[in-house]
C-alpha cells in the first residue's frame, strides 16, 4: 500500500499531512505526485472530490522546500476556487515555513494584492483577468515562475479565458513545468494541451465512487408554470442545508425575493457581487445562519462546505459537465447527500446529454461517441426549417 512516506517528502510536509490525517494518497495523487516530482508535464482528468488540489500542491511545495528556485502559478476560473486552493496550500505548509502563498483575484482590493506581491510570494493563485491586469500594470513579474498549473481547464475554456491564459504565458519562462487538470478531456482540451504542454504524461481517474455510492439523485418532471411550487415542496420536505442552482445572476436575486415572500429565508451568490460580500455570504451559509443558498455556476467549483445535504438544480446547467460539479457540492468528506433536478420540456435535450455523461462516468470502460452527446449546431436546425418552408412553398406554387 502506497503512503506519502514513499515520496521522500520534506519533514515539514510530512508533518502537515499527518496533522491533516492524510495517510494514504487518493488515486489521482498516487498517479500524479511521483511524475510531477520528476519535472514532467501532466495532462490529468479527475472528477470532483478526487483530491486533485493536493495532487499538484504537494509536489509544488516539495519543490519549493527543496530549492528556493521554484515559483508556482496556479490559474483557476473563479474566486471561490482560488480561496479553496489557497486554504489547502496553507494547510499543507509547515507552520515554521517561510513559504508565502498569495491570492490574486478580481473583486478584491488591488492595492492589498500589490502589497502582497512586493513580498515575493513563491506561490500565486489567481484568476486570469486579475493576473493580466497586474502584469499590464507591471505590478507582477512572472519571469521566475517555472511551475504552472491550469486547474479546471475545461471550465476556463467555456468561460472564455483561453486568450487571457495565452497572454499570461508570454510573461513566463519557456522552460517550465506545466500541469493541466480537467474534469474531462474532450477534444478541445487535447488541442489545448499540445499548445501548453511538453510531452505530457496522460493521467486519468476513471471511477468516481462519490457519484456512485454517496449521492442519491432524483428527477422532478415539471414545467415553467409549476416549477416554483415544486421547489417550495422540495424545500419543505427536506431538512438540512440546501444549495439551489439557477442559470443567471438575475434569477438568483429574483428567486431569493420570491422565497422571502413565502417566508423562506435564503442567500443569493453570483458574479456581480464584490468579493467581500461573496465571502460574507459564504461564511453565513457555512456557519448555518441561513439554510438555503441560491447560486449561479460560480458555486459549482471551489465551494467546499461539508454540511451541504441537498443540491437542487432549479435550472439545468449550460454545460453538461457542470452537472457533475454541481451535485459534487454535496456528499463532501465522506458524507452522503441528495441531488434533485427539475426537468421541464425545454430541458429534455440537455438532460439526455447529462444522462449519457453520467453513464460514462459510472461505466468508464463503456465506449461512447462524443458526437452523440453534442447538440446539433443551430445553423443545421435553421437549414432544415428553410428546406421545409421551400418545399411547402413549391407545393403551394404547383
Image (cartoon, rainbow, N blue to C red):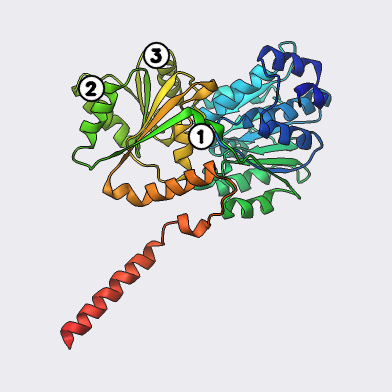
Q: Earlier in the sequence, mark 2 or mark 1?
A: 1
Residue under circle 3?
Answer: 288
Whole-angstrom CA distance, mark 2 to mark 1, is 35 Å
Q: In the picture shown, does residue 197 fall above or below 300?
A: below
Residue 212 numbered tag: 1
Residue under circle 2?
Answer: 260
Q: In the picture shown, does residue 74 fall above or below 65?
A: below
| Residue 75: x %, y % from top left | 61, 36
Whole-angstrom CA distance, mark 1 to mark 3, is 28 Å
| Residue 265: x %, y % from top left | 28, 19
Whole-angstrom CA distance, mark 3 to mark 2, is 17 Å
Circles 3, 2 touching at the beta carbon (< 8 Å): no
Question: Which is more foreground, mark 3 or mark 2?
Answer: 3
Q: Residue at x 17, y 86 (%)?
A: 397
Between residues 135 and 388, which one lies in front from this camera angle? Answer: 388
| Residue 194: x %, y % from top left | 68, 53
Amino acid at each position: 500500500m502506497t503512503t506519502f512516506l514513499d515520496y521522500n517528502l520534506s519533514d515539514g510536509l510530512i508533518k502537515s499531512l499527518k496533522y491533516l490525517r492524510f495517510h494514504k494518497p487518493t488515486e489521482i495523487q498516487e498517479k500524479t505526485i511521483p511524475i510531477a516530482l520528476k519535472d514532467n508535464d501532466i495532462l490529468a482528468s479527475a472528477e470532483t472530490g478526487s483530491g486533485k488540489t493536493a495532487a499538484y500542491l504537494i509536489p509544488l511545495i516539495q519543490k519549493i522546500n527543496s530549492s528556493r528556485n521554484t515559483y508556482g502559478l496556479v490559474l483557476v476560473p473563479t474566486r471561490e476556487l482560488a480561496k479553496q486552493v489557497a486554504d489547502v496550500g496553507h494547510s499543507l505548509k509547515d507552520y515554521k515555513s517561510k513559504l508565502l502563498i498569495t491570492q490574486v483575484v478580481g473583486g478584491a482590493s488591488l492595492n492589498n494584492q500589490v502589497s502582497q506581491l512586493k513580498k515575493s510570494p513563491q506561490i500565486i493563485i489567481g484568476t486570469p483577468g486579475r493576473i493580466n491586469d497586474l502584469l499590464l500594470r507591471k505590478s507582477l513579474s512572472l519571469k521566475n515562475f517555472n511551475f504552472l498549473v491550469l486547474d479546471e481547464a475545461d471550465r476556463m475554456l467555456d468561460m472564455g479565458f483561453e486568450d487571457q491564459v495565452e497572454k499570461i504565458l508570454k510573461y513566463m519562462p519557456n522552460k517550465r513545468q506545466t500541469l493541466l487538470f480537467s474534469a474531462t478531456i474532450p477534444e478541445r482540451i487535447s488541442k489545448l494541451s499540445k499548445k501548453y504542454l511538453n510531452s505530457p504524461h496522460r493521467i486519468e481517474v476513471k471511477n468516481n465512487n462519490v457519484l456512485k455510492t454517496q449521492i442519491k439523485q432524483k428527477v422532478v418532471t415539471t414545467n415553467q408554470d409549476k416549477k416554483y411550487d415544486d421547489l417550495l415542496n422540495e424545500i419543505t420536505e427536506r431538512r438540512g442545508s440546501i444549495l439551489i442552482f439557477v442559470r443567471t445572476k438575475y434569477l438568483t436575486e429574483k428567486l431569493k425575493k420570491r422565497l422571502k415572500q413565502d417566508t423562506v429565508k435564503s442567500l443569493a451568490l453570483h458574479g456581480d457581487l464584490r468579493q467581500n460580500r461573496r465571502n460574507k455570504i459564504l461564511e453565513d451559509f457555512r456557519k448555518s445562519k441561513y439554510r438555503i443558498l441560491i447560486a449561479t455556476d460560480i458555486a459549482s467549483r471551489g465551494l467546499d462546505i461539508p454540511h451541504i445535504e441537498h443540491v437542487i438544480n432549479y435550472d439545468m446547467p449550460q454545460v453538461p459537465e457542470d452537472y457533475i460539479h454541481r451535485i459534487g457540492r454535496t456528499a463532501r468528506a465522506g458524507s452522503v447527500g441528495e441531488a434533485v433536478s427539475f426537468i421541464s420540456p425545454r430541458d429534455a435535450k440537455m438532460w439526455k446529454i447529462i444522462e449519457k455523461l453520467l453513464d460514462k462516468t459510472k461505466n468508464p470502460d463503456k465506449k461512447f461517441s462524443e458526437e452523440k452527446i453534442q447538440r446539433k449546431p443551430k445553423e443545421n436546425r435553421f437549414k432544415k426549417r428553410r428546406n421545409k418552408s421551400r418545399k411547402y412553398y413549391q407545393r403551394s406554387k404547383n
